[in-house]
Image: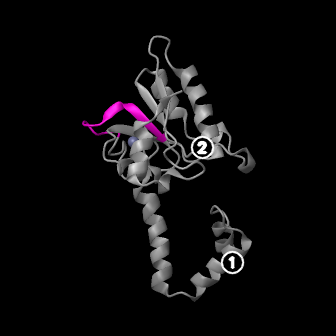
Amino acid sequence: MSRLIDELKKLPGVGTKSAQRFAFHLLRSSDEDAAALADAVRELKASLRLCSICNNVTDVDPCAYCSSPVRNQRLICVVEEPTSIASVERTRNYMGVYHVLHGTLSPLHGVGPDQLRSANLLSRVERGEVDEVILATSPTLEGEATASWLATALRSSALRDHAVKITRIATGVPAGSDIEYADEVTMSRAMEGRREL
Ligand SMILES: [Zn+2]
């Protein structure tokens, strides 16, 4: 029991109380339900990984976007989480690829530049493989701080003879909200109205 509680406490946002509640719930649930949860966790780790190019969650590496011959591999949209990709895809007029940071800068929660997955993006820029980077982090304090830090990092990685255009999505997405919840019209406008930084 305490082993399970210790493992559950490692999940984000789960404290001792919640972990205990989950553990007792599992103890009372049927063998099938408990086995289904254990299997789902095992299968997730066995069949899914992060794309080595863009950090998207995928069952094949590189992911479907990074290996697509019809997508513009030199246009990269940077998002916070893999789930944010769906918001941009819903607009149906973005034909570039993605880069997933898996978080935003958040000094209060101990998330600094080193905790974000940006190294593979910066090295693509260093190799001159990128024409434009669209910063599509949310218009929250953390999202804005992340966009401005990344813009500086991208600029210093860019080759002298190959400038990279760095753009930020327009604030069609309501300030302080998460782009994950933006509807397709709002998101389309935000992408179209992006401005150069
Ligand atoms: Zn990928």
Label 1 CB-ligand 1 distance < 8 A? no
Q: Quadrant of ligand 1?
A: top left
Q: Is residue 133 above or below residue 175?
A: above
For marks 1 and 2, the one nearer the N-term is: 1
Q: Which mark is residue 20?
A: 1
Question: Percent from the top left, x then y, of residue 121?
Answer: 49, 32
Q: Is residue 118 above or below residue 10?
A: above
- Residue sitting at 47 percent across and 65 percent down? 42
Residue at 47% x, 59% y: name it.
45
**Residue drawn at x 51%, y 80% as measured from the top left:** 34
The location of residue 145, given as percent across then percent down, is 64, 38
Q: Secondary structure at mark 1?
A: helix
Quadrant in which the N terminus appears: bottom right
Point out residue 91 in the picture as x, y percentages from the top left corner: 35, 48
**96 is higher (above) or lower (below) than 175:** above
Circle 2 residue: 143
In three-dimensional space, the C-alpha distance between marks 1 and 2, rounded to whole angstroms, equals 33 Å
User: Residue type at mark 2?
Assistant: Gly
Between 94 and 43, the residue placed more toward the observer is: 94
Q: Quadrant of residue 96?
A: top left
How crowded is the residue under tag 2: few (<14 C-alpha within 10 Å), some, or many (20+)? many
Please tell me how crowded label 1 is: few (under 14), some (14-19), or many (20+) other residues with Cα within 10 Å. Answer: some
Seen in the image, is 25 located left or right of residue 6?
left
Q: From which residue to which does the magenta span run? A: 66-78
| Residue reaching furthest to the left | 70
Q: Amino acid at mark 1?
A: Gln
Q: Is residue 10 magenta?
A: no
- Disc 2 residue: CB within 8 Å of ligand 1: no
Q: Is residue 123 visible?
A: yes
Tell me the tag on residue 86: none
